Amino acid sequence: METTIGIIAGNGIYPETFIAAARKKVPGVKLVVAGFHSETKEEVAGLVEAMEWFRVGQLGGVIKFFRKQGVSQAIMVGQIAPRNLFDLRPDMRTLVMLAKVKERNAETLFGAVADELQKDGIELMDATTHLEELLPSVGHVCGPKLKKRAIEDAEFGFRTAKEISRMDIGQSVVVRHGTVLAVEAFEGTNACIKRGGELGRGKSCTLAKVSKPKQDFRFDVPCLGALTIEACREAGVAVIACEAEKTLLLGRKDVERLCDEHQITIYALEV
């Protein structure tokens, strides 16, 4: 029986990365994509069996398309900012769903989307499905080897990031020599990196990026990519402490190349 996976595709290289991995891991798989105007790359259409374009907020249309294509499993890959998810003329199904959501944050909104898919017999898979080789193991990942002091800073930043993620403030911090320089909140990781680098005078700073307690990996996976490495280079961040087995290295070869080129170390820790 043919396996058909529906891909809810946002921006960046995440959709392409998943498509290549799924082709490798599931021979004969049929892949269909729900893309979004001004978000999804047009090139994705040439990589799959079927693709339709939607406005952000057309959940009913996405589900109808998936059912027509015989989708039984779906995956969310690529970023679409939660604040933009339903602001472009939501369809009736989206409006009904939103009326039931009391708190509108990323977790509740995407959780509600998963529930709607399930009503039509479509299972939303973890966003790391078929991408296990992109999840780093504990210890040195790439870049220069770390000295004891740098490892201590990585561990300090990791513990701090875990604590702020527990309070649902953010998932990243920038530290230097045991001092917290910047804490991520609504502004996002790159803005946190920039602010931390400025306060640390662009020298010997460490970025720690973690998952939240009880994080739902169906739609919320910590990611590191080339843009993160470039942001760290510009800010003077020399070490990135990530969470082992729970962080995706998107474009891993490019990430490793850039880390070697700019002398930035990625180091993975676990709770």
Image (cartoon, grey):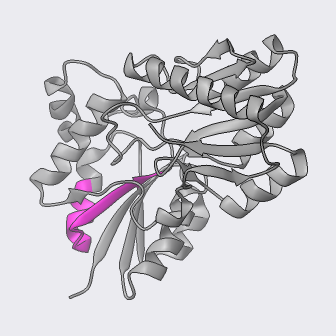
Near-viewer residue (153 or 194): 153
Which of 102 and 96 lies nearest the eye of the viewer? Answer: 102
Q: Which is more toward the observer, 32 or 110? A: 110
Give the vertical position of 259 relative to 20 (above or below).
Answer: above
Q: Position of residue 88 (x, y in %)?
A: 40, 33
In the rendered structure, the answer to whether residue 163 lies left or right of residue 253 reads left
- Residue bounds of the magenta highlight: 63-77
Image quarter where the C terminus lies is top left
Q: Position of residue 127 (x, y in %)?
A: 40, 54
Residue at 54% of width from left, 20% of height from top? 160
Answer whether residue 98 is magenta in the image: no
Q: Is residue 67 magenta?
A: yes
Which quadrant of the structure image shows residue 153? top right
In the rendered structure, the answer to whether residue 161 lies left or right of residue 179 reads left
**Residue drawn at point x = 87 percent, y = 23 percent:** 203
Relative to 211, does residue 18 appear above or below in the rendering? below
Q: If the image is split into quadrants, where does the N terminus sit?
A: bottom left
The answer to whether residue 91 shows anywhere in this view is no
**Would you say residue 126 is visible in this rendering?**
yes
Against 169, is 124 above or below? Answer: below
